[in-house]
Amino acid sequence: MNKFKFSILIGACAIMATACEDKLDEEQKGVISYENFYQTDDDAQNALNGMYDVFSKAMTNANNVGIQNAMFFTFNLCGDDMYAAGEFYGDNDFMSQLNEFRYASDHECLTNAYKAFYNIIYAANLVINNVGKEGAEMTDVKKRCIAEARVVRAYCHMMLASVWFDPPKIEKVLTGSEEILNSDHTELLTWCGDECMAVVDDLDERNGSSDKDGTVKVTKGFAQFVAGKSYMFAGEFEKSKSALKPLVESPNYALVPSDRIGETFKAKGDGNEEQIMATNISVNMAVGVWNGMIQRSVWMYSNIMNWRLDHLAGAPEEITNGWGGLGLREDWTTDFINNDGEDSPRRKAWMKSVDEVFYEMSYGAGDLKDGKPMTRAEKEVDPNRGIKKCIYGYTFYWEYKRQFLNEETYPGQAFPVRNTLLARLGEAYLLYAEACARTNDEAEGQKYLEAIQKRAGSKTVGLNGKSLLDAVKEEKRFELFAEGCRWPDMVRWSEQDGDASIFDRIKDNGKMVPTMYDAFFDANGSVTIPKEEGGDPKESKHRFYIEESHPNTGEVGFTNPTKYKYFPIPFSETQVNPKIKQHEGWTTAETTEE
């Protein structure tokens, strides 16, 4: 079968030119010509709105692909804190391929995330190149529109460089005749920071910490965040500290207090004081559920990632059903609790113990017996709670931080109504603390580290016998869990600090995966038949236990750092742009079809 080859980076421009080639001589009616657009402030703002439309859709539902949330999986599943779980081994295998380091260069999430970033870059370049074209009259509105687009373009390049190492830098709308080459990793990241700092004065400030609108557009705060993070990844630590300092000191942002720590990742926290930038779902009936609204939601995220309620005998009423795709590693939860303590507000907001799931969370009417609240002892023998069918990839603590709740689901639909958070002050504090640690500003850095620890309600406050740098690294492991930070940081620290040991926890990914059972039920989910009636005796009350399985006997785990430290350039791109160099350890022909 012949395959149509097309460059991801050239994108829609060449597609449109090809599709319309036979109509170029026809005069179009009722439209503004390309030459006459981008002239006024309204034109500039409309072009920018178009970029934000592409941005929000690409960041939440990359390329409108069915069940994936390519951005979440790409940046989270390769770390050392979670399992790619599900109903059984092989369920949604695109997740396990990432988690176990057995993906190929045509992996669907990697390809779709890569493509989505360049779709955004293309949309940003339309604004930058046309609103700011040579000879155009500049106004404050146009300067702001160009500045917002440049920051979005820098953000996308930064994210690409953090996991793809040397992706091409694209500064203009491509026509198809340009050479597309790898960039220099450090130079690209430095350019990202410089781009943001060059336009920061043309951007609006967030108008105080209660300004919700200021969290769904590019502001000075987001530009400073992107610059600081870009410089950090480039190893430009003084520049990183300088870019981040006005952000962490700004009165326009604040950490939410301990008793609200979980809301930042739920719909009720959209636009709160800690959020710096999020893509806006735009709940608007005029747009239509299936004609724009759903494309801005984290489509199918709740289906894949939420707890598998159909494997339970009964379920907490606040949780919407899912496929159980994200399990927490027991070594990570143990380290978290050793650091925070069992009762820290952060622990309770980030994860739930099985006891909390089955005995403390509300089951509505299921919490009543004969009209009275059930006691703990009654709940422990209640056949309408517990695990009736085993849960693959789960341990004694279940991820709660990014769970979607019933209250967040659009009425009558299966998708959640929540903005997609891209940047928050908690991460900015820890980036700044790390920059301080790397520039010998210990007291300043420790102040921001401790602000995060105290807000978490952690029993570990201060350095706990570690250097400031090591303490910040450890804190980031817990505070930024499931926010797309851990894997890029692991790769960066291995490079900047020569720390290959950071990969020790993932070298066996996929070789041993837990499955959770409830001794109250048999493997088929029925209360066990007594032995005298030909069955195995059930236990008298719920007891949750784990058995380790060996799901994959092939080559899995982080066994080849040269190959897997950075993601491969997508197979489709190397086929149409032969001058792009594939990363070491990969061949341009290596795909899942082999």
Image (spheres, rainbow, N blue to C red):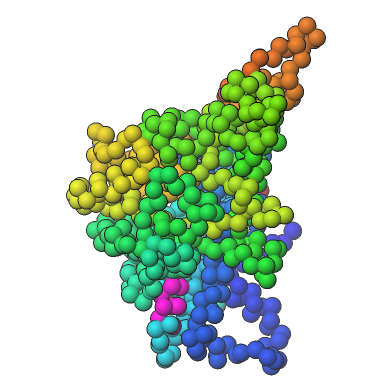
Q: Is residue 90 above or below residue 124?
A: above
State the extent of the magenta-drawn residues as a range.
142-149
- Position in image of residue 291 (x %, y %): 69, 67
Image coordinates of residue 266 in percent, x first then y, are 53, 51
Out of 103 and 590, give the one closest to the viewer.
103
Q: Where does the N terminus fall, quadrant-wise?
A: bottom right
Specify the quadrant of the image occupied by residue 538. Answer: top right
- Compared with residue 285, is residue 511 higher up or lower down, i.e. above or below? above
Nearest the viewer among 454 and 513 is 454
Q: Is residue 294 left or right of residue 440?
A: right
In the rendered image, is residue 370 in sight?
yes
Residue farthest along the front direction in this orientation: 371
Q: Residue at x 26, y 38 (%)?
A: 463
Across and down, in percent, residue 186 comes to 34, 59
**Where 37 falls versus 241 (above or below)?**
below
x, y percent for residue 525: 73, 25
